[in-house]
Image (tube, rainbow, N blue to C red):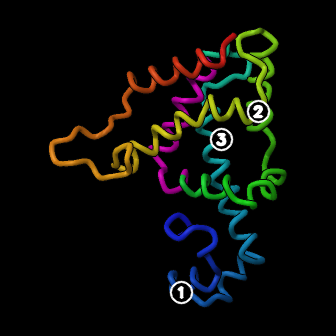
Amino acid sequence: MLVREGLDGFSMQRLARAAGVSPATLYIYFKDRDDLLFQLYKVEMEKMAEVTLKAFDPELPFADGLRVQWRNRAQYCLAHPLEAEFLEHVRHSPYHQRFLPRLDPEFIEKMGLFVKNAIRRKEMLPVPKEVFWALAYAPLYQLLKFKLSGRSLGGQPYASGETKFALDDGTMELALTLVIKALTP
């Protein structure tokens, strides 16, 4: 419901109706709508962080660490597309800034240490974190959107006989190589 209708279209009453329970039942488990959203976000962020940190070490060389990140993030998004889209909805909402400080800081600390190490070793250009995110991860997430949406670049369904976008190892490596090149001194 959250992914389909967005955060603005979500209410406890609509959720209760869809689940076939009384709204009072939801309030047994959650203080309010914001508490429910935070609990969902927390659970999904923990799952995403666990997958993302698999075989990742902030001490890895920049290219190797980014490669592990891409592989792990893609694995999570492809295995959990609705959950990943929910995380994106929250990330681009006012809730993100309110929820972030309440999460386990390990994931953010490891990502920050990875970037600091890469800059210190002169493997990465020192750029603002927003520029880093836009260059390091946004291309991967856009490729995943193409893959998961089943739509072409123009947003149209693929025409009969047209080859659908395939997010394979070669395509990911091509994009990752370009990203590394953009961030490397």
Q: Amino acid at mark 3?
A: Ala
Residue range (magenta): 64-84
Cα separation, mark 1 vs mark 3, equals: 32 Å
Secondary structure under badge 3? helix
Label 1 neighbourhood size at 10 Å, few (<14), some (14-19), many (20+)? few
Q: Residue 43: say if magenta.
A: no
Q: Position of residue 104 (x, y in %)?
A: 79, 46
Q: Position of residue 29 (x, y in %)?
A: 71, 76
Tag 2 residue: 129
Tag 1 residue: 17
Cα separation, mark 3 vs mark 2, equals: 18 Å
The number of discs equals 3
Q: Nearer the viewer, mark 3 or mark 2?
A: 2
Q: Position of residue 81 (x, y in %)?
A: 47, 51
Residue at the spot x=82%, y=54% of the render? 102
- Which mark is first along the chain, 2 or 1? 1
Label 2 neighbourhood size at 10 Å, few (<14), some (14-19), many (20+)? few
User: In the displayed structure, would residue 43 be above or below residue 61?
Assistant: below
Q: Amino acid at mark 1?
A: Arg
**In this view of the protein, which residue sits in the foreground, 134 or 122?**
134
- Which mark is first along the chain, 3 or 1? 1
**In this view of the protein, which residue sits in the foreground, 119 or 15?**
119
- Which mark is first along the chain, 2 or 3? 3
User: In the displayed structure, would residue 147 be above or below residue 70?
Assistant: below
Residue at the spot x=26%, y=48% of the render? 158
Tag 3 residue: 49
Secondary structure under badge 1? helix
Type of secondary structure dominating the magenta stretch = helix
